[in-house]
Amino acid sequence: ARAASRRFRTVAEALTQTPQLSSTARAAAADPQLASVLSNPQLVSTVFAPNNAAWSALAKANSPLLTNPALVRDSVAYGVVTSRAMSQDELKALGPGSTLSTLSGASIVVGQMSPGAQQALAAGDGRPVSQEAGELLGGYPAGSAALMMSSDTGAQSVSVVGQPLVAGRSIVHEVDGVLIPKTAAAVVAGIEA
């Protein structure tokens, strides 16, 4: 059975029991306060959970973010939109440029990439877009716009990939990158300078 057909009791359970999200599960569990929030079956949220490939990309780039537990926590919390569980259709209906407040206190921006842009990016340098243009992108058939989320700096964006997971009163969306809030990005830039 596909993960999308499973229902989980909590966000923490969904992260832990979904193999491609195990790195996010470990990052969340490492912070007792965040682990408590995500283990609450009454939590109402939309969660953008980076997949294992997203965390691996940071490791391969030797990102200083990974050596700072507070920044890792902030990045995971940055993917938790509080007070509303939104499906992909509801997120798309918000429209490009809409902002969503997150558990970290910062906002993320909703966006969409047109099918033409997906194909151009995939063809331009051979990098995959989400799960490749022409595949199911964020639960939508080929030819529809991919759902994107951007950081509050606008310097980075991630795509929603795969099927959403129902986790108690929340919805978990797998994303192909780790969004880093402005506060953490400033610290990481200072470390790298």
Image (spheres, rainbow, N blue to C red):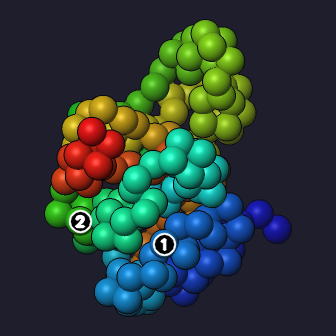
Near mark 1 (Cα within 10 A), the count class, few <14, some 14-19 or many ≥20, is some
Residue furthest toward the front? 193
Q: Is residue 109 left or right of residue 171?
A: left
Would you name the residue on which mark 2 appears?
Answer: 104
Would you name the residue on which mark 1 appears?
Answer: 27
- Marks 2 and 1 sit apart, C-alpha to C-alpha, by 15 Å
Give the residue type that dot 1 points to.
Ala
**Secondary structure type for disc 2:** loop
- In the foreground, 136 or 14: 14
Residue at image coords 60%, 36%: 130
Q: Is residue 45 left or right of residue 24?
A: left
Quadrant of the image for the N terminus?
bottom right
- Sequence-wise, the earlier of marks 2 and 1 is 1
Tell me whether circle 2 and circle 1 mark residues in contact (CB < 8 Å): no
- In the foreground, 22 or 59: 59
**Secondary structure type for disc 1:** helix
Expressed as whole percent of the image width and height from the top left, the position of residue 58 reads: 52, 48
Residue furthest toward the right? 1
Residue 166 lies, with reference to residue 133, above or below; the image says below
Tell me which corner region of the image, top left, top right, bottom left or bottom right, holds residue 21: bottom right
Residue at image coords 56%, 16%: 121
Residue 113 lies, with reference to residue 131, above or below; the image says above
Whether residue 176 is visible here, answered yes or no, is: no
